[in-house]
Amino acid sequence: MKMYTETANLIGCLLLLLCLCIISACDETGDERIRFGLSTAPVTLDPRYATDAVSHRINRLIYRQLVDFDQQQRMQPSLANWQVISDTHYRFSLGNDGRQFHDGSRLTAADVKASYEAVLDEQAVSPHRGNLLNISTIRVVDENTVDFQLHRVDPLFPGRLVIGIMPAALLDAGHPFNQQPVGSGLFRFIAWPREDQLLLERISDRQLIEFNTVRDSTVRVLKLLRGELDLVQNDLPFELLDWLSGQDAIVVENGRSNTFSYLGFNLRDPALRQEKVRMAIAHGIDRENIIRHVLGNAANIATGMLPPSHWAGHPDLKPYGYDPKLAGKLLRQAGYGEGRRLRLEYKTSSNPLRLRLATIIQYQLKQIGIDIELKSYDWGTYYGDIKTGRFQMYSLSWVGLKMPDIFRYAFHSDAMPPQGANRGYFSDKVVDTLIEEAELEKDPKRQASLYRQLQQRLHDLLPYVPLWYEHNVLARQKDIRGYRLSVDGEYDGLGSVYRER
């Protein structure tokens, strides 16, 4: 039986639209901007409130942070080096790089203190406040040195200091960072005339970068082909990637990422509470064929939240293989069969790709004896249902995972909504203990070992089904050079991108 939609109709429609378009010359406009296509607009340019991926990635260009991460997601200095004075006392010493704000003032320890106190201010209601509540006091030692005193031991604390630093004087004056950001990053803010158009300037050479929001993926591809966009990263129709690769003016690149896609369960549900049912679902999904035929081979099968390349990842976990016979057997052991078919509701967003993937999973699970009712919603409604536990099954992705503290946020029994993101209401004493021990472990090797034991336990209990790590994909004009994809999907490549003359 044919499971996957042919791409001919989509490509045919695209070609027809191209023929209907009046192709105008766009290389002699005298405009030196490099145009970057987005699928969604940033919500805020204030780092205290940025939680969506696009806002975070653009804020990262405008502001500098104390600490960053390497390719294995190990903590490394950015604005500052740190010294552990005691288990609960950290000293950060600012270096020379990134010390000038875009308004001309100098970044000092007082700005660091003011930025973090602004996040911790209860009245500000920053969504990042909860991640920093372990901070007891912040003290300026001198203009280059700031001390953080903690309530309790936290060996991962430096990795929490990733909020962009803002000028203290502007914070005190109530400056609207949301619309007029002032940081010390590689790019300065120029204008945000419309929701779908944002202009930044690279400090080093005054190269202008224009972010254009084009929500429809096919229109985004059309604009790329017409030269109205120079770069598009991710959120591309996978079925068009091979076709795009064959266009003379376009270059398509892809690289591995840590974007983790998974199938989540509500463990309060009587059926899904059974481990055998969850195992049956895991063995009933043909990830390899989905990746090959739907995702254009731009993904890798996942075994856990953290990829094997992460310093705390588990390289030896084996994926649940596609085995419909075993899946059927597990369902029968759980009390389901032809006389009593299991029926589940599966929620997803109305994004065309996500809905298509859900439809394929629906078909595959039907073959093993599970009848799935699909429900798709706009993003706001869908995400609201997930956060409040109104689901049986759903699919989502964790984007840009860096710190292993995600395990507490997603799986500790104390992190059930609204305290955290344990949305499946999973509870296991062994998991809780491993999380707590790993968080307090100061030896990096021992800490990594504890996180691997934790991931093995989660792999065995299956509170969620790992699906795949979606690749980062870049489509660019052939004369655009120097952009490097990062594993976490950041836009850092804009720091070195240029147009070849």
Image (spheres, rainbow, N blue to C red):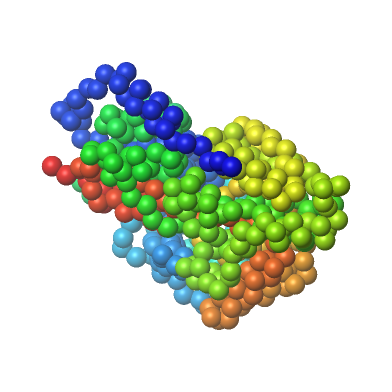
Query: Which quadrant: the N terminus?
Result: top right
Q: Quadrant of residue 372?
A: top right
**Is residue 87 something that shows in the picture?**
no
Using the image as rendered, state which of residue 305 and residue 188 is in the foreground.
Answer: 305
Using the image as rendered, state which of residue 6 and residue 299 is in the foreground.
Answer: 6
Where is residue 490 drawn, in percent x and y?
Answer: 41, 51
Query: Which quadrant: the C terminus?
Result: top left
Using the image as rendered, state which of residue 159 and residue 220 is in the foreground.
Answer: 220
Where is residue 316 drawn, in percent x and y?
Answer: 55, 73
* Residue at the image position 34 percent from the left and 65 percent from the top: 95
Q: Quadrant of residue 196?
A: top left
Where is residue 435 drawn, in percent x and y?
Answer: 67, 70
409 is higher (above) or lower (below) than 345: below
Q: Is residue 122 left or right of residue 199?
A: right
* Residue at the image position 63 percent from the left and 69 percent from the top: 455
Q: Is residue 37 left or right of residue 266?
A: left
Using the image as rendered, state which of residue 260 and residue 284 is in the foreground.
Answer: 284
Q: Quadrant of residue 201?
A: top left
Residue furthest to the left = 501
**Is residue 280 something that shows in the picture?**
yes
46 is higher (above) or lower (below) than 197: below
Where is residue 261 drawn, in percent x and y?
Answer: 57, 52
* Residue at the image position 36 percent from the left and 43 percent from the top: 242
177 is higher (above) or lower (below) than 89: above
* Residue at the image position 69 percent from the left and 68 percent from the top: 460
Count of labels in the image? 0
Q: Is residue 104 left or right of residue 49?
A: left
Q: Is residue 65 left or right of residue 403?
A: left
